[in-house]
Amino acid sequence: MRKTLSATARSSSSFSSKASPTTRSTVLSPEGIITNWNAGAERIKGYTPQEIIGQHFSKFYSKEDAAAGVPQIGLDTALREGRFEKEGWRYRKDGSRFWANVVIDAIRAPMAD
């Protein structure tokens, strides 16, 4: 069975003129490596696809949270339970932070024969 993870961050961002939250989706490998990046993710986090694809998603966490294993807890939970959801501070390329509701969903597809 092939596994990937979809990470979605919802944030009231300065990029949206609406008061409602915006949604940005990223595809991760089970190890947390970013494998797909869309224009919405680029707008909210500041990285181009060329800069971020192939990088670990812990880049969006504080150094303290990354060192404490917080990103890995999210991955492990999503792989074990199918979903992980938590609110917290995340960081853009420029170092500015934003409050996000992060959801990591496990996407499981059967392997081709």
Image: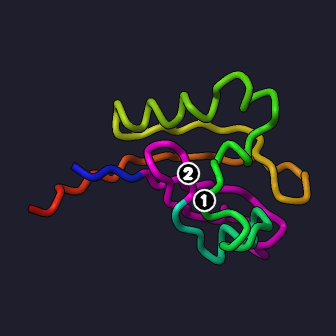
Disc nearer the start of the sequence (1/2): 2
Circle 1 residues within 10 Å: few <14, some 14–19, many ≥20: some
Instruction: Magenta stretch: give its range.
Output: 5-34
Amino acid type at circle 2 is Ile
Q: Which residue is mark 2?
A: 33
Q: Position of residue 73 (x, y in %)?
A: 54, 28
Q: For numbered disc 1, what is the local secondary structure? A: loop
Quadrant of res 34: bottom right
Amino acid type at circle 1 is Gly
- Assess whether mark 2 and mark 1 are in contact (beta carbons under 8 angstroms): yes
Q: Residue at x 74, y 26 (%)?
A: 67
**What color scheme is it?**
rainbow
Q: Residue at x 90, y 52 (%)?
A: 95
Q: Residue at x 59, y 36 (%)?
A: 86
Q: Position of residue 111 (x, y in %)?
A: 18, 57
Q: Residue at x 56, y 31 (%)?
A: 72
Quadrant of res 76: top left
Between residue 101 and residue 19, name the one nearer to us: 101
Q: Position of residue 78 (x, y in %)?
A: 42, 37
Between residue 113 and residue 57, name the one nearer to us: 113
Q: Which residue is mark 1?
A: 54
Quadrant of res 68: top right
